[in-house]
Amino acid sequence: MTDTLSPPQPQQARRRTKRRRSRLGTAAFIVLLVALGLVATGVLPVRDFLERENAVNGANEQLAEVTAANALLAEDVDALYSEQEVERIAREQYGFVRPGEVGYVAVLPDQPDADVAPVESEPVERDERTIPQMIWDFITGNDLTGDG
């Protein structure tokens, strides 16, 4: 018996090559799965982040609009506390007069009540579709879109 190694048989060499290829294929598959997992977990949070960023931007725009409206209302409130504005409102809405002035109210007897306006009715649109057409439009949803 000799301690030297004998050259590998061609069949054994093929088996080793197949094993290496299968191991490489398995390793490549595992790396691919891990990469796909990382991409999936990396992409979805980015999408959530972008959606939240858009929501924050929308809320900031809304806040700016509300702040501008509040500033206008604050100016109106400040104007209401001036003596000229109080006098104007008292004269226009409540008929107040200053001492020494005479207030007049004009009443026209022949005119109808200005508060009561005649009611004008709008013509009713008639649906020219038949009942089976209306049922079909209801089932298909065409009655909601106005296509029917």
Image: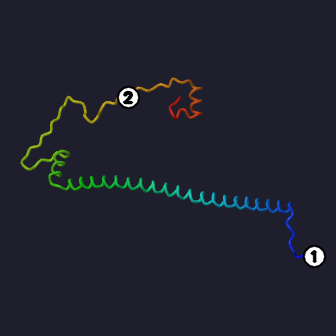
Q: Is residue 42 left or right of residue 57?
A: right
Q: Quadrant of residue 36?
A: bottom right
Say which residue appears at 41% left-offset and 55% top-offset: 59
Residue bearing the label numbered 2: 121
Name the residue type under label 2: Ser
What x and y, as percent, mark residue 115? 27, 36
Q: Nearer the viewer, residue 73 or 12?
A: 12
Question: Which residue is at a point 87% across and 74% down the rendered structure image?
Answer: 4
Q: Quadrant of the N terminus?
A: bottom right
Q: In the image, what residue occupies the spot 59% across and 33% down? A: 140
Residue 17, given in percent of the width and then of the height, sits at 79, 61
Residue 142 at x, y = what percent?
Answer: 55, 32
| Disc on res. 96 | none
Classify residue 112 by image quadrant: top left
Q: Is disc 2 placed on a helix, strand or loop?
A: loop
Q: Is residue 68 left or right of residue 89?
A: right
Q: Amino acid at mark 1?
A: Met
Image vertical order of residue 28 relative to residue 87, above or below: below
- Image location (x, y in percent) of residue 111: 21, 30
Q: In the displayed structure, would residue 144 be above or below residue 89?
A: above
Count residues near mark 2 (Cα–Cα under 10 Å), then give few for <14, some for 14-19, many for 20+: few
Q: Which mark is residue 1?
A: 1
Q: Secondary structure at mark 1?
A: loop
Q: Nearer the viewer, mark 1 or mark 2?
A: 1
Residue 16 shown left or right of residue 144 in the figure? right
Marks 1/2 in contact by CB < 8 Å: the verdict is: no
- What distance separates the C-alpha of mark 1 from that of mark 2? 118 Å
Query: In the rendered structure, which disc, 1 or 2, sits on the residue that comes first in sequence?
Result: 1
